[in-house]
Image (cartoon, grey):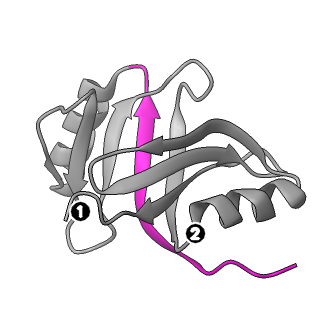
Amino acid sequence: MEKISGKVIGFELNSQDPDKAASFYANVFGWNIGAPNWGYQNVETAGGIDGGISKGPHDFPHGTRIQIEVEDLDKAILAAKQEGAVVVREKMEFDSFYLAYLVDPVGIGIGLVQSSTKGQ
């Protein structure tokens, strides 16, 4: 099977109380937390990998999920499924990227991201 190249580009902190989480990380670690946009708040860490905070959905109510950037989202999803991953959110289109959520064979949630040229 062809290997898919992927790099960690971000994270999501999901909880049922995202405002409390945002306050905690801002006050303890000095992270800059953006205003909510579609229930998602961008996070700028103190020089590390940036990410976001949001209210977790019913199938991922709390926890941390890394975001992995790939060149071809469809190929990456296929390869992941062949290795035992389960797709929990099919490919979604946003202004400048595509995103899908999967659970790997041991139960860890991940996001796969592919840049698009649509917004450029």
Q: Residues within 10 Å of mark 2 (few under 14, many from 20)?
A: some
Image disc number at residue 103: none
Secondary structure at badge 1 equals loop
The residue located at (88%, 59%) in the rendering is 82
Q: Position of residue 49 (x, y in %)?
A: 34, 69
Secondary structure under tag 2 reads loop
What is the magenta range?
Answer: 1-16
Image label count = 2
Question: What residue does disc 2 label?
Answer: 72
Note whether 104 is above or below 47 in the view shown: above
Where residue 23 sits, quadrant-wise, is top left
Circle 1: residue type: Thr
Q: The N terminus lies in which quarter of the figure?
A: bottom right
Q: Give the left or right position of residue 97, taking residue 19 as reference.
A: right
Task: State the residue in front, 33 or 37.
Answer: 37
- Nearer the observer, 102 or 64: 102
Above or below for 67 versus 61? below
- Could you say where residue 25 lies in the image, as x and y percent from the top left? 26, 46
Quadrant of the snapshot with the C terminus: bottom left
Secondary structure that dominates the magenta span: strand
Q: Position of residue 20 (x, y in %)?
A: 27, 26
Residue at far front of view: 118
Residue 45 got which mark? 1
Query: Which residue shows up at 11% across the image and 36% down it?
Result: 35
Say which label, 2 or 1, has the lower sequence index: 1
> Which amino acid type corresponds to the residue marked 2 in the rendered image?
Asp
Say whether residue 34 is left or right of residue 88: left
In the image, is residue 98 part of the stretch drawn in magenta? no
Cα distance, mark 2 to mark 1?
Answer: 28 Å
Residue 10 forms part of the magenta stretch: yes
Corner quadrant of residue 40: top left
